Amino acid sequence: MAGTGRNDYIDKLVNLSRELLGKNSYKINFIGAQSPKDIRSLMSQAQALIVASRCEGFGRMSAEAALHHCLVIGKKTGGTEEIINLCGGLGYTGGSGELAQEMEFFGQLSEQEKREAFLEAIKLFTNEASAKQVCDYYNQILLEQKNR
């Protein structure tokens, strides 16, 4: 688990993982804040990214995850919901029980189903795709000016 938070909350999560998983609690590694390069590397190695934030602006980390073959399991709010709608992924609206159901469903997806979000993200969020979208928009403005 990467990221920062209040120490009391992190301690609560560590204790909860020990309580629930016992000797298997080592399977959850709390690694704290990481550099952007390390986060990208972690996303490339992961199969899914859980975005449980109450609200994300654009949902940049969700788009980055999709570009790294890492399916998003996220709360249907703000930018996370937008990225899931655009690229694919799994969304939930409720609490931890619903998140657990989506995680279980994720385990049943085929590799092709998991790959679809990556393919959509390439169409939308690579540097080349962004440049094409900007050029298309400028061309649209020029065409509208010409037709006036």
Image (tube, rainbow, N blue to C red):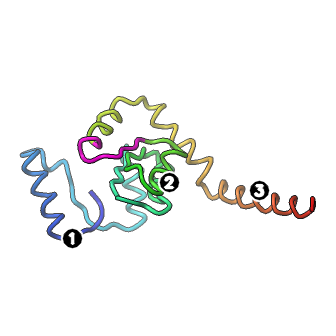
Crowd band around label 3 with a 10 angstrom C-alpha radius: few (<14), some (14–19), many (20+): few
According to the image, label 2 marks what residue?
Answer: 63
Please say if the residues under marks 3 and 2 sit with CB atoms less than 8 Å apart. Answer: no
Residue 119 in the image: x percent, y percent?
56, 41
Residue at the farthest right position: 147
Nearer to the camera, 68 or 54: 54
Q: In the image shown, does 19 or 67 lie closer to the viewer?
A: 19
Residue 61 among magenta residues: no
- The structure residue drawn at horizontal position 82% and vertical position 59%, both measured from the top left corner, is 139
Crowding at dot 2, Cα within 10 Å, few <14 / some 14-19 / many 20+, comes out as many
The number of discs equals: 3
Tag 2: residue type? Answer: Ala
In three-dimensional space, the C-alpha distance between marks 1 and 2, rounded to whole angstroms, equals 26 Å
Q: Which residue is mark 3?
A: 136
Tell me the quarter of the image containing the C terminus: bottom right
Check the image and report above or below for 138 versus 100.
Answer: below
Coordinates of residue 87 in the picture (x, y in percent): 53, 44
Mark 3 vs mark 1: which is more N-terminal?
1
Q: Is residue 29 above or below residue 87?
A: below
The residue segment tinted magenta is 90-99
User: Which residue sits at x=79%, y=63%?
Assistant: 138
Q: Position of residue 135 (x, y in %)?
A: 76, 60
Question: Could you say whether the residue bearing mark 3 is in a helix, strand or loop?
Answer: helix
Of mark 1 and mark 2, the one earlier in the sequence is 1
